[in-house]
Image (tube, coloured by chain):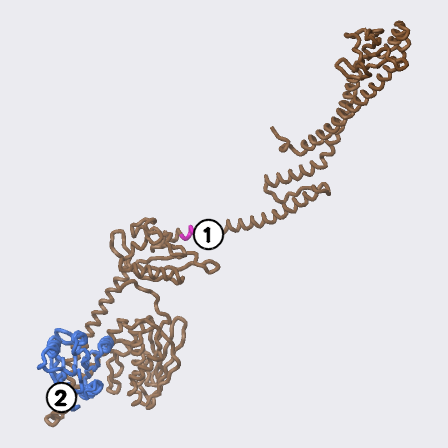
Chain colours: A brown, B blue
Amino acid sequence: MLSLRDIPIKQKLMIIIMATTTAALLLAGAGIVASDAFLFRSYLQRDLSGLARMAADNSTAALEFDDRQVAAETLAALRARTHLVSACIYKSDGTVFAKYTRPDARSGCPAAEARDALRFTSGGLTVSRAITLAGRRVGTFVLLYDLDEISERVKLNGATVLGVLLVSSVIAFLLSSKLRDVIATPISRLVGAATVVSETGDYSVRAQRLSGDELGVLVDTFNAMLAGIQLRDGNLRTALREREEALQDAEKARERFHFLAESMPQKIFTATPSGDRDYFNRQWTEFTGLSFEQMENWGWTQSIHPDDVEADVRNWRQSIETGEPFHLQHRLRRADGTYWWHLTRAHAMRDARGNISMWIGSNTDIHEQKQREEELRRANEDLQQFAYSASHDLQEPIRNVAVYSEIVAKRYNNLLDADGRQFLGFLTEGGRRLATLIDDLLTYARVGVIDDQMTAVDSSAALRHALSSLAQVIRESGAAVTYDPLPQVYMGASHLQQVFQNLIGNALKYRRVDQPQIHISAVDQGAAWRFSVQDNGIGIDPQYKEKIFGVFKRLHRDQKYSGTGIGLAICQRVVERYGGRIWVESSPGQGATFFFTVPEHAPRVHSAAV
Amino acid sequence: MPRESIPPPFNLLLAEDNLPDALLVREAIKMENLPLEVYIAPDGERTIDLIVKAENDPDAACPHVLLLDINLPRIDGFEVLRRIRASGKFKDLPVLMVTSSDSPADRREAAKLGAGYFRKPVTYDEFVKIGAVLRRLLEEYGLL
C-alpha cells in the first residue's frame, strides 16, 4: 500500500487540500455547535429562573388563602411550555399544595430545596424558588424542565454544519482539481522530461516552463543542467568513441603483431618496461621445450648457457636502465639439451611522450654462421701459425745464406774472381729478397686476424707513424708529403698505418720527377670515410688497375722499382677486412690516386663468450 | 745485484739454437769492444738450468745480461723469461729478445716482461748493430 509520501503529487495536493478544508470546517462547526449549546443553556437558566419567580409570586395569595384552585390554575398556565415536565408548590410544612405534571411524566414533584437553586440532573434542570410574603417564607415553588430542547438544537446545528461541510468539500474538491494543476502540471512535465531522459538517454529533451515561480526556476535549472549534461555527454561519447577506436586499433595491431610474431622463423619475445618478459612466440616454446609459465618474467634465463647467463642478465638490466638497444650473442638450450648460438636483439618501444611502453626482442639462430666463423677463425689461426713458423723457420736459413754469403764476399774478396763475386752477390740478394717476401707474406696472412681493439683511432696519428717509418725514403727522394685534417675511424691503428705506409711507399717508389708530391686527404661520404693518396708519379695503365691488387703481381721487373708485389694485396685485404674497398684512378704519366673507404661506425654486437 | 761491486768482464748468456746467428752476435760484441764473456745455451731448458745453477751455486758463472731467442727448442724464450722474472735473484736481469719475429704480439709481450727487442736483420751491417744495442742496454743498467 502506498504511503502518503509515495503517492503522486496531484493526489497528495488533493488529500492535503481536502484534509485541511474538512478539518477547518469540522473545527469551526463544532465550535459553533458548542457555543450555541452553551448560550442556549445560559438563556434557559435565566428564562426558567424568571418563570419560577413569576410563578412563585403569583402563588403567594393562593397559599395565603389556601386556595388550591387558584394555585392549580397558576400551574396550569405553565402548560404552554412543552418541555416543562412538572411544577409543584409546596407549603412551608413541606406538603404539596398544588402540582402540575406533563401527561408523559414518569416522576412526580422534584424535592424542594431549602434555598433557591438551579440544578442540572439526569432528569433535566430543576429550579427551586422560595415563596415569601412580607419576608416570611410561606412555601416553595419547584419545577423540572427537560433538556431535550438543547439536544435538538445541537442536532440541528450539527446537521447544518455537516451540510455545509459536504457542500464545502464538493466545492473544495472541484476548486482543487483545477488549482492543483498550477503546481502539479509543471512538476509532472518536469518528471515526464526527466523520465524520457532517463529512459532514452536523450539529453536534448527540455522541460517546458509554465510559470515564473520557483517551479519555473526549477525547470530552467533542470534545462540548464540537461544542457550541461548534453555537452558533457557529447564530449564523453566522442572520447569513448575515440577510445573505442583506439582500442580497436590497438587490438588490430596486437593481432597483427602476434600473427607476425608467430609466423616468424625467429624466436620473438616482448617484455614490460621493467624488463619482465611477458610474451614468447611459438618458436620459443618449441625450441626450448619450456612452457610460457616456465619462461615468463625471468624464467627464460634457465634456457641460457650457464657461461652466458651473467653477461646476458647484466646487459639486459643495463638496457632496461638506459633504454639502449640490447644486442648479444649467446647460446640457447634446445629441448634436447644442446646449446645453439643465437643473436638476440631487443629494442624499446616508446609512446608519444617518449616513455618506454614495451620491449620487443628477437633471437636469431646464428649457430651455423657462428660455426663457420669458428672454422674461419681456426683456419686463420692455422694460417697465422703457419706464417709465424714460416717467418721464423724460413727466415733463419735464408738469413744465414744472405748474411754469410755477404761475409764471404767481404772477407774472401781477394780469393774470388769476378764470376765468384757476382755469384755470391746473387746469393746475398736472393736471400734478402726471399726474406722480404716472407715478411710480406706474413703481414698479408696476419691481416685476417684483427688483433687491435675496435676503438676509434685517430687516422692522422696512424699516418704520422707511417710517415715516420718512411722518413729515410722521403728524405732521400726529396718528396713533399702533405695532408688534410683526418678523421677518427674504427680500424686497427696498425692496419691503417700499414695501408698508409704501403700506398705512400708505392708513391715514393714509382716517382717520375725529382721532387715527388704526395697528398693525403679524407672525405665524409655519410656511411664511410673515403681516404685518398694522390701522387704525381709514373701512373698506372688503366688496363692494370684491377690486376695490381693481386698477390705477387708486379708491373715492373726493373731493379729501379724493387718489391715483392704484396703491398697492394695487403692494402686490399686490410681495407676489405674492415668492410671498405680500395681502387685506383690513374693514367700513365699523369700520376695516380689510390682511394679506400672505412665505414664510420664500428659494428655494435657484443658476444657473451668467445 | 750490487752492480758497482762487479768488475768486468761481465757474463753474457746467449740463448740461441742457430749457430750462425750466435757467431754473428759474438762478432758484433767483439766489434763493439764490449767487456763481455759469452756463454751459449742452445735451448730453453739449458738456459734455465744455467740460471738455476747460478742462483744456487756460488762458484757457478753468474749471468749479468741475457740475449734470448724466442723460438727456442724445448722451452720457448718467453717461457724462459717469465720464469726468470718470477725468480728471486735474477728477476731484474737485463734481457734482450733477439728474434726473427716481427710480430706485434711478440713485441708487446717482450715489453710486458721488461725485455728489449732486436729483430734479426738480413744484412751483415744491420745485424752487427746488435753490438750498439747491447751497449746501450748495459749502460742503461749501469754496467758500463
* Residue situated in front as seen by the camera: A202 or B67: B67
Please give the range of residues in magenta: A251-257
Q: Residue furthest bottom?
A: A414
Residue A544 can be seen in this image: no
The amino acid sitting under disc 2 is Pro
Q: Quadrant of the C terminus of chain A?
A: bottom left
Task: Name the residue nearer the viewer: A331 or B86.
Answer: B86
Q: Position of residue A241 (x, y in %)?
A: 53, 49
Q: Which residue is mark 1?
A: A250
User: How many residues crowd mark 2 within 10 Å: few (<14), some (14–19), many (20+)?
Assistant: few
Q: Is residue A133 magenta?
A: no
Task: Give the number of the disc on residue B9.
Answer: 2
Please identify, in this view, whether the residue under mark 2 or under mark 1 is nearer the observer.
2
Question: Is residue A328 found left or right of A245 in the rendered image?
Answer: left
Q: Which of the 4 image quadrants contains residue A314?
A: bottom left
Q: CA distance from mark 2 to mark 1?
A: 90 Å
Percent x, y of residue A515? 34, 90
Q: Nearer the viewer, residue A1 or A305?
A: A1
* Quarter location, residue B83: bottom left
B54, above or below A419, in the image: above
- Return the chain for callout 1: A
A476 to A365, vertically: above or below: below
